Image (tube, grey):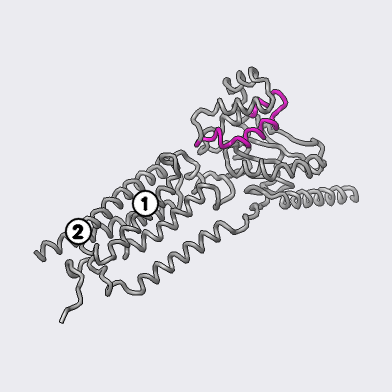
């Protein structure tokens, strides 16, 4: 009578335990559980709604800026609420904010006179081309076109970022051209790093305020970390306006 | 079985890191430290693809070899054992290099990269144990 064929191989070795009788159902259950947990975890991580920007009380008082720090303002300087943004031109989250969220904020908040926005550089050390981008934008400010350059730099981030090139000057020059700058003036400023001290001072201002990631926003005494949504920013501005109105009301009643 | 289990877990870790690198999941800000720092450096890309994507390839290959080794026809294959040892040995060396970069060059640690490094090391040790055990058994048996 024929005997069932037994798997050959050394008895008791680790790999010899791979014959059918030693592959218990439990093994496949473990594989199934890992697969289910992995797929579930990835699906949750991919599909969950964006986390709201983290909000904490800003360190008080915030007496404007100190030293040579000087941001770039957009909007009416006498607007009732001031938004301060610390951002890194090479930060992908900042680019998402600048290209997707910020257009709405400009139209419905800045241009509506509800607030103004001041941008400060915070070039993070891991973004090797960010300093160049900050210099490129600062040089555009000499010609009164910081915001046009800001928009071009963020829109073209994939062209000049660390992953794309080690020398971003050519791509930044294209951005300068698209922003309508006088290229000769821009290039001499850029090559001389004429505004490096301003950029360093802006980064120092971020450190003074305890900013550790970009983008970070200060609105009405609160610090918002992460790319804030339009709704979050509108709510923050409404709260800041209400607080300012209440404060001025109580001042008047005294 | 242990190698297959570890490799399957590694596949999901590597897929997660790849999606993170591609900006599809993860934190929503660029911070001074942590996974974002590590994933923003030039070392997070290797030969034109995210390092994590190479990790997916590594774990899928390891999982495939380990599952093949569970089939009766490959139960005695020393070549397959050796392939697992060599593949995971390369993985340990590559992970070691990445961990060195994190500690001494980037000065930031990505927790999921550490999880992956531990998995690769465990796969290597189990594969090596298996390979050595088989050699020993051969000597005793023959």
Residue A162 x/y as whole percent: 51, 35
Q: Main secondary structure of the magenta part?
A: helix
- At label 2, counting other C-alpha atoms closer than 10 Å, the crowd grade (few under 14, some 14-19, many 20 or more) is some
Residue at point 75% right, 52% down?
A235
Instruction: Name the side, left or right, on which A21 lies relative to B54.
Output: left
Near-viewer residue (A182 or A207) = A182
As drawn, the residue found furthest toward the left would be B142
- At label 1, counting other C-alpha atoms closer than 10 Å, the crowd grade (few under 14, some 14-19, many 20 or more) is many
Near-viewer residue (B126 or B118) = B126
Residue placed under numbered mark 2 in the picture? B132
* Residue A158 visible from this viewpoint: yes
Q: Quadrant of the N terminus of chain B?
A: bottom left
C-alpha separation, residue under disc 1 versus residue under disc 2 = 22 Å
Please give the range of residues in magenta: A137-163
Q: Quadrant of the C terminus of chain B?
A: bottom left
Mark 1 or 2: in front is 1
Residue B120 sits in quarter: bottom left
In magenta stretch: residue A160: yes
Residue B2 x/y as whole percent: 32, 64
In magenta stretch: residue A148: yes
Residue placed under numbered mark 1 in the picture? B58
Chain bearing mark 1: B
């Amino acid at each position: 009578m024929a005997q069932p064929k037994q798997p050959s191989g050394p008895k008791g070795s680790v790999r010899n335990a791979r014959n059918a009788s030693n592959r218990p159902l439990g093994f496949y259950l473990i594989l199934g559980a890992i697969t289910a947990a992995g797929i579930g975890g990835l699906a949750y991580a991919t599909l969950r709604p964006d986390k709201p920007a983290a909000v904490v009380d800003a360190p008080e008082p915030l007496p404007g800026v100190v030293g040579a720090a000087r941001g770039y303002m957009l909007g009416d300087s006498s607007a009732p609420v001031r938004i301060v943004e610390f951002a890194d031109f090479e930060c992908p989250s900042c680019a998402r904010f600048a290209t997707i969220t910020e257009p709405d904020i400009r139209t419905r908040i800045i241009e509506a006179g509800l607030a103004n926005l001041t941008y400060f550089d915070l070039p993070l050390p891991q973004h090797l081309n960010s300093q160049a981008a900050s210099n490129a934008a600062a040089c555009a400010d000499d010609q009164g076109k910081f915001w046009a350059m800001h928009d071009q730099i963020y829109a073209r981030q994939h062209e000049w970022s660390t992953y794309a090139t080690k020398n971003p000057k050519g791509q930044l020059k294209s951005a300068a051209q698209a922003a309508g700058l006088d290229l000769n003036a821009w290039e001499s400023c850029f090559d001389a790093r004429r505004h490096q001290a301003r950029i360093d001072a802006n980064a120092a201002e971020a450190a003074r305020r305890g900013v550790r990631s970009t983008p970070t926003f200060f609105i009405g005494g609160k610090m918002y970390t992460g790319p804030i949504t339009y709704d979050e920013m509108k709510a923050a501005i409404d709260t800041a306006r209400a607080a300012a109105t209440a404060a001025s009301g109580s001042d008047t009643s005294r | 079985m242990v190698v297959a289990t570890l490799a399957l877990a590694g596949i999901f870790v590597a897929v997660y890191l790849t999606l993170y690198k591609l900006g599809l999941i993860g934190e929503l800000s660029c911070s001074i430290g942590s996974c974002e720092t590590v994933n923003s450096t030039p070392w997070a890309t290797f030969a034109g693809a995210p390092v994590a994507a190479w990790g997916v390839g590594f774990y899928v290959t390891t999982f495939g070899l380990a599952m093949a080794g569970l089939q009766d026809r490959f139960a005695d294959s020393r070549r397959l054992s050796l392939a697992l040892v060599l593949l995971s040995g390369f993985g340990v060396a590559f992970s070691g290099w990445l961990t060195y970069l994190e500690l001494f060059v980037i000065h930031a640690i990505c927790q999921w990269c550490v999880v992956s490094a531990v998995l690769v090391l465990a796969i290597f040790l189990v594969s090596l144990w298996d390979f050595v055990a088989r050699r020993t058994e051969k000597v005793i048996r023959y």
